[in-house]
Image (cartoon, rainbow, N blue to C red):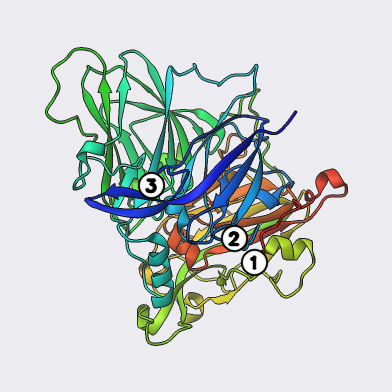
Amino acid sequence: KPIPTINWVLTETKYTRLCSTKKILTVNGLFPGPTLRVHKGDRIIVNVKNQGKYNVTIHWHGVEQPRNPWSDGPEYIAQCPIKPGANFSYDVIFSEEEGTLWWHAHSDWSRATVHGPIIVYPKAGTTYPFPKPDAEFPIVLASWFKGDVMEIIQEALISGDEPNKSDALTINGQPGDLYNCSKPGTFKILFDYGKTYLLRVINSIMNEEMFFMVAGHKLTVVGMDGAYIKPLKTSYILITPGQVMDILVTANQSRGHYYMAARASAGVVYDNTTTTAIIQYSGNYTIPSTPKFPNLPNYTDIDAVTNFARRIKALASKEHPIDVPKKVDTRLFITIAVGTLPCATNGSCTGPNGNRLAASLNNASFQNPEIDVLQAYYKKIHGIFTTDFPDKPPNVFNFTSDELSDDVVTPTAGTKVKVLKYNASVEIVFQGTNVLSAAENHPMHLHGFSFYVVGSGFGNFDIKKDPKNFNLVDPPLLNTVGVPKNGWSAIRFKADNPGVWFMHCHLERHSSWGMDTVMIVRDGPTSATSIRKPPSYLNPC
Ligand code: C2O
Ligand code: CU
């Protein structure tokens, strides 16, 4: 049977927000972009034509793409960019996940405007592990910049300093009532009393973890990152960039108008503006002058961040069992830090102490190679990357102390990758640090896999004590974990997906500064356990 094909054209499209009009890069003119609706087991071809002015690629965030790194997307990792005027066909295979995921551009900062939901429905003949909702709404959280995002990141990288903050956060493309000139456009949904709605909340914000609430209504989180979780009743959620949560909301309050609102959280020291949308009940009632506002956790409420994350457990049912590696044969201990490196340019460099901001994993600050890592690996082109990504940091120290020695804050720049044996049982402990007192939560994301989050805590990871408390019974299966500020998170996965897979912080400025690496998973013994053949056309670098 033929594989369904979808055509996407990337174009610069005029949008007006916050009283000003500019052109943004969109898919088919839409911001946020189109929603992909598929069933588990489907496969689609997405033809992307780039009619914009920048190089671009598209990534299917959270889609494992078994043995198919060729269509994974990150530029200079899995492919060379689609240049203006060129095109590329992505072959996307939805074999593992069920629930909500998303797609986004994966080249410089183009994902600010080029992103959209992916909804993976259960296979025909199967259904949700919760009562079928009466209706569903994607809720896409995003960032709006008055300037051109690609120029903003280019300028920041040249100056070595912080990039501009976004000018607004948005829900489904709209800043909402609290921002200038935004009221008429505020996103609204209609509730019928007694019905239950599924909100598919996606954090595609560039640099902020978010609290999200609906005034007056309880939330029941039933899924995360394309996997089911034990129903979690809560008044608020904390969602980190890259993550997705499926949330049931029952229309059981008095008929009226209610805000849903999202605000940046404590773990992030970047921006604290609030974006809103409105829920309006149907029926006859006196329209209030202003909707009810939710009591969002405070911007500085760090406990609200960690308490929420700790309550998430995998569904772990008979139909949706978990498969967490009980024994581990490959261990990595990865420190996450922001530091500085000498400026490459002079004169225009205005970073801290005349250096440029840089970020690292185990003191290695990632640099994009000139040819994508996948092609270099597959075609055995030497000199593009090195396989010496360290298994642990070069120094052991008190990672959360304020004063760290210089060798800790000065990383080494390079293209260091980690090679994993096929089927290795991998454990990675991510350790946050307090370097440059820019400590914040880091949403660590791995391509090609979902992983089990088996533990997390504050302070330094203790190899003697902490593993004893790992959850191997119902750990959540995620593709992005919020590593706590000044704390650690431990993940496990089986390296059964041969390919070249990017791993990075999903705060976009950290990723731009080098908080990235690549996992190369070697081929298994047969062609059915090896990387697929490359497509006949690959974009030239
Ligand atoms: Cu959502 Cu590498 O990305
Ligand atoms: Cu980060």
Q: Nearer the viewer, residue 210 or 20?
A: 20
The relative height of residue 139 versus residue 363 in the rendered view (above or below) is above
Left or right side of 258 for 304: right
For marks 3 and 2, the one nearer the N-term is 2
For marks 1 and 3, the one nearer the N-term is 3
Q: Which is more foreground, mark 1 or mark 3? A: 1
Hey, what amino acid is under mark 1? Cys
| Residue 12 seen anywhere in this rendered image of the structure | yes
Alpha-carbon distance for marks 3 and 2?
Answer: 23 Å
Element under disc 1? loop
Residue picked out by circle 3? 142
For marks 2 and 1, the one nearer the N-term is 2
Q: Are marks 2 and 1 in contact (CB under 8 Å)?
A: yes
Q: Quadrant of the N terminus?
A: top right
Residue 114: image x %, image y %? 46, 49
Residue 390, picture quadrant: bottom right
Report crowding for label 1: few under 14, some 14 to 19, many 20 or more residues within 10 A (C-alpha).
Answer: few
The numbered dot on residue 332 is: none
The relative height of residue 267 versus residue 280 in the rendered view (above or below) is below
Query: Does the Cβ of the disc 2 residue fall within 8 Å of ligand 1?
Result: no
Report crowding for label 3: few under 14, some 14 to 19, many 20 or more residues within 10 A (C-alpha).
Answer: many
The numbered dot on residue 541 is: 1
| Residue 405 seen anywhere in this rendered image of the structure | no
Q: Nearer the viewer, residue 292 or 82?
A: 82
Element under disc 2? loop
The relative height of residue 413 versus residue 308 in the rendered view (above or below) is below
Residue picked out by circle 2? 81
Q: Are marks 3 and 2 in contact (CB under 8 Å)?
A: no
Hey, what amino acid is under mark 3? Ala
